[in-house]
Image: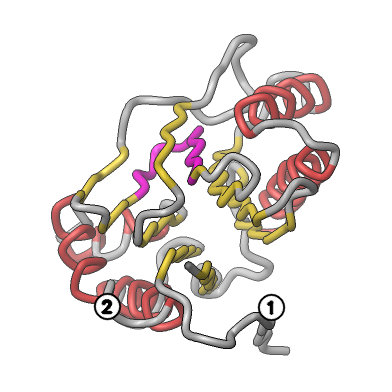
């Protein structure tokens, strides 16, 4: 098996920097985690919130904490640091090779899509963003890492895409679009979802949009090299 991850992002039209932060980190016992956060508001203030959330989460993952404990600890840190005055979403997707599990942890109004392994799921169970209430816990779902699956997560810029034209995205439409791209590589999946959302906003995103695609696929012979590629417009 082989793990592929791709991230596609675009800022809200006319606003920079965007309020979303996404990072990929290696797990100390094996595997990778992707951490996605959307800070309350927009621009620099939102970016400061999401950057704090993601950096705190990555630090805890590096220390060996499990994802559920990471989400709770990051919430506590944001709650204390900002005195319950700001919120942020937090989604963690981990391919944990030590336990052979795919773990999805959500504190977000955005669903996570899971395709493959004989399933087509929209993980949209009710959960709350972190930071504003004393006791908040994540919604966690686990899957067998040995099954071929595609996971798509995103910030709420996807959900609001097209809303100004009276055509906001619904879970069924998102799942259908993700399924149409699932046979392609991760970069095409995340990029395709992002482009679809931008087109719904007529080329002017009404909110920051971040898309994470993670795919567990068959590995070709002799492909033992680990690779990471980043393109960042300046």
- Residue for point 41% across, 52% down: 156
- Residue 107 visible to an observer of this rendering: yes
Q: Is residue 110 magenta?
A: yes
Residues at badges 2 and 1 in contact (C-beta under 8 Å)?
no
Residue wearing tag 1: 226
Viewport quadrant of the C terminus: bottom right
Q: Is residue 174 above or below residue 80?
A: below
Of the pair 108 and 33, the residue shown nearer to us:
33
Image coordinates of residue 149 in percent, x first then y, are 34, 59
Residue at far front of view: 221
Q: Is residue 71 above or below residue 15?
A: above
Q: Is residue 93 magenta?
A: no
Image coordinates of residue 34 in percent, x first then y, are 61, 55
Of the pair 99 and 59, the residue shown nearer to us:
99
Residue wearing tag 2: 183
Sequence-wise first label, 2 or 1? 2
Under circle 2, the secondary element is: loop
Magenta range = 102-112
Image coordinates of residue 16 in percent, x first then y, are 66, 70
- Residue for point 46% across, 30% down: 140
């Amino acid at each position: 098996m082989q793990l592929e991850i791709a991230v596609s992002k675009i800022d809200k039209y006319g606003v920079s920097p965007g309020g979303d932060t996404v990072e990929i980190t290696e797990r100390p016992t094996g595997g990778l985690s992707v951490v996605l956060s959307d800070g309350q508001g927009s621009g620099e203030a939102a970016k400061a919130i999401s950057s704090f959330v993601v950096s705190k989460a990555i630090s805890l993952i590096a220390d060996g904490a499990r994802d559920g404990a990471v989400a709770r600890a990051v919430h506590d840190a944001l709650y204390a640091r900002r005195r319950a005055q700001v919120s942020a979403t937090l989604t963690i997707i981990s391919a944990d090779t030590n336990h052979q599990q795919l773990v999805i942890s959500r504190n977000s109004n955005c669903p996570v899509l899971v395709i493959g392994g004989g399933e087509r799921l929209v993980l949209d169970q009710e959960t709350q963003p972190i930071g504003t209430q004393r006791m908040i816990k994540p919604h966690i779902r686990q899957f067998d890492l040995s099954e071929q699956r595609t996971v798509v997560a995103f910030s709420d810029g996807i959900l609001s895409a097209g809303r100004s034209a009276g055509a906001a995205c619904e879970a069924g439409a998102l799942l259908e679009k993700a399924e149409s791209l699932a046979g392609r590589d991760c970069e095409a999946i995340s990029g395709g979802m992002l482009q679809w959302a931008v087109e719904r906003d007529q080329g002017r995103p009404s909110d920051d949009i971040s898309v994470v695609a993670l795919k567990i696929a068959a590995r070709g012979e002799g492909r033992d090299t680990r690779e990471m590629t980043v393109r960042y417009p300046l």
